[in-house]
Image: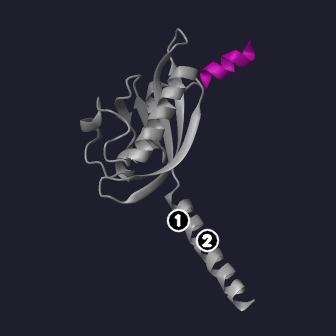
Amino acid sequence: MEHNKEEKSLIPSGKTMRAWLDKSPACTKIVDLDFNLRYMSDAGVKGLHIDNATQLYGKPYPFDFYPESFRDVMSKNMEKVVETGVVVTQEASVFDTEGDELWFHSTIIPVNNDEDIIDHLMIVSIDTTIRNKAESELTAVNENLEQRVEDRT
C-alpha cells in the first residue's frame, strides 16, 4: 500500500509533463489514430527547422518532406502499434525543411485512455545523425585500410 502511495506521488503534474516535453532533447510527437500530428516538442521543431509547428497540427504524419522510404516504414510501424499495442522502434534518415539529412532512432508508443484502449501514439525520436556519420566515416576508413593491405599482398 505504501509503495502505491509513493509511486502515485511521483506521477508528474501537467505542468511538469509540459516542461518535460518542451525542454527534452528528444523530438516527441503526439499522433492521433488517423495518423495526424497533434503535438510536436520544441526539439523536433528546432531540429527540423520548422517555422511554426502548429501549421502541421491536424496534418498527416509522417511529413510530406520526408523521403517516401521513411514515410512507408513509419506508416507501417504506426499501423502495427495500433493493431498490436506493442512498442515498435526504427532508425532511418529524414530530411529537414532545408534539405539536410538527419538520422533518427524513433520509438512508437501506444498511449491508452482510462478504459485501456489505445487513444493516440507518442513517437519519441532521438537524433543519431552524428553517430551515423561517424559510423560511415569509420567504414570508409576501414575499407581504405583493407584495400591498402590487399594492394600490398
**Does 43 appear in magenta?**
no
- Residue positioned 25% across, 43% down in the render: 52
Crowding at dot 1, Cα within 10 Å, few <14 / some 14-19 / many 20+, comes out as few
State whether residue 82 is above or below residue 62.
Answer: above
Instruction: Indicate whether 92 appears above or below 115.
Output: below
Position of the C terminus by quadrant: bottom right
Q: Give the Cα distance between marks 2 and 1.
A: 9 Å
Classify mark 1: helix, strand or loop.
helix
Q: Residue at x 54, y 47 (%)?
A: 91
In the picture as drawn, the residue positioned furthest to the bottom comes out as 152
Answer left or right for 111 relative to 9: left
The dot on residue 97 is none
Disc 1 target residue: 133
Q: Amino acid at mark 1?
A: Lys
Query: Front-most of 68 and 49?
Result: 68
Q: Nearer the viewer, residue 49 or 136?
A: 136
Residue in the picture at 35% in, 32% down = 37
Query: On the image, which quarter does residue 10 sit in?
Result: top right
| Image location (x, y in percent) of residue 47 | 39, 52
The residue stretch that appears in magenta: 1-10
Answer above or below: position of 106 versus 57. below
Q: Which residue is mark 2?
A: 138
**CB atoms at circles 2 and 1 under 8 Å apart?**
no
Q: Position of residue 124 (x, y in %)?
A: 50, 39
Residue 96 visible in image? yes
Give the residue type at disc 2.
Leu
